[in-house]
Amino acid sequence: MESKLLYEGKAKRVFATDNPDEVLISYKDSATAFDGQKKGTIVGKGKVNNLMSAAMFGYLEQKGIPTHFVRLVSQTEMIVKHVQIIPFEVVVRNVVAGSLSKRLGIPEGVVLDEPVREIYYKDDELHDPLVNDDHIRLLGKADQRTVDTLREMATKINSLMKPFMAARGLTLVDFKLEFGLFKGEIILADEISPDTCRFWDSQTNEKLDKDRFRRDLGGVEEAYEEVLRRISGGVNK
Ligand code: UDP
């Protein structure tokens, strides 16, 4: 089934399949942080991120969000639609954390009245800079209508994911989304996992995401497994 390696990233490998409209994604256990400066392994991460992404894409599809997900192949592999990735990442925030806290000097944990949305330009050499609509126009890589669609889809996804996580005892602090073009349609791509979202336990505010790796908090593998357990187990709190 697996064939030509099309792309190898920090956390995934992408392979061609017999169907030119589909590719196979293989999730890895390797982890990076701080723009690739910190490297490590999170045992079982590939499985957690693959299975969790499949569950989230399935849920979102059911709620009317088009995604690249086609089917699971194994615990660490899925088939997805072969999209052309739009080179802008959308971050949605419900609680202040990470770079927002640093940039604006607001303490971590401040709950936002309205979600804060940010767009970053995907470019490793430039270290994925934060961009506004004028910058996006200047770059010429996406038109205003596309950018508006990305923001609207991200807002809708947040309003679907927040209660889904809350019902499983998780506060959805923030997350990053990537979108792709498939036969002219903008669809959700990449992954939804503890690598790309911040989750805090609703009762204790314990961090259950990649911040455990970034900040050397210990219990990294356990946190990833716990998130998958809550997502797969359905409503349990
Ligand atoms: N994020 C991501 N990939 C990136 C940058 C951010 O998945 O390259 C996610 C991150 O896990 C968090 C959210 O986007 O859930 C906001 O991240 P932030 O801007 O606070 O950056 P960080 O503190 O992670 O550097």
Image (cartoon, rainbow, N blue to C red):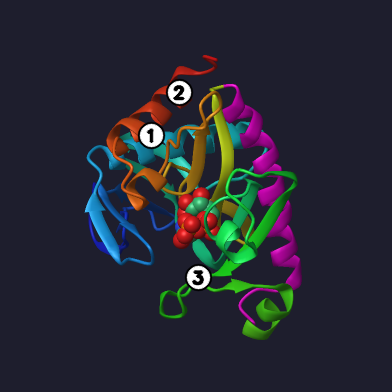
**Residue 165 sits inside the magenta stretch:** yes
Identify the residue under disc 2: 230
- The span picked out in magenta is 140-167
* Amino acid under disc 2: Arg
151 sits to left or right of 60: right
Q: Where is residue 22 drawn, in percent x and y?
A: 41, 52
Q: Where is residue 136 drawn, in percent x and y?
A: 66, 77
163 sits to left or right of 113: left
Residue positioned most to the top: 236
* Amino acid under disc 1: Leu
Identify the residue under disc 3: 122
The 10 Å Cα crowd at callout 2, few under 14, some 14 to 19, many 20 or more, is some
* Amino acid under disc 3: Lys
Q: Residue at x 61, y 78 (%)?
A: 141
Identify the residue under disc 1: 51
Q: Where is residue 218 drawn, in percent x and y?
A: 29, 39
Sequence-first disc among 1 and 3? 1
The 10 Å Cα crowd at callout 3, few under 14, some 14 to 19, many 20 or more, is some
199 sits to left or right of 144: left
For residue 20, above or below residue 236:
below
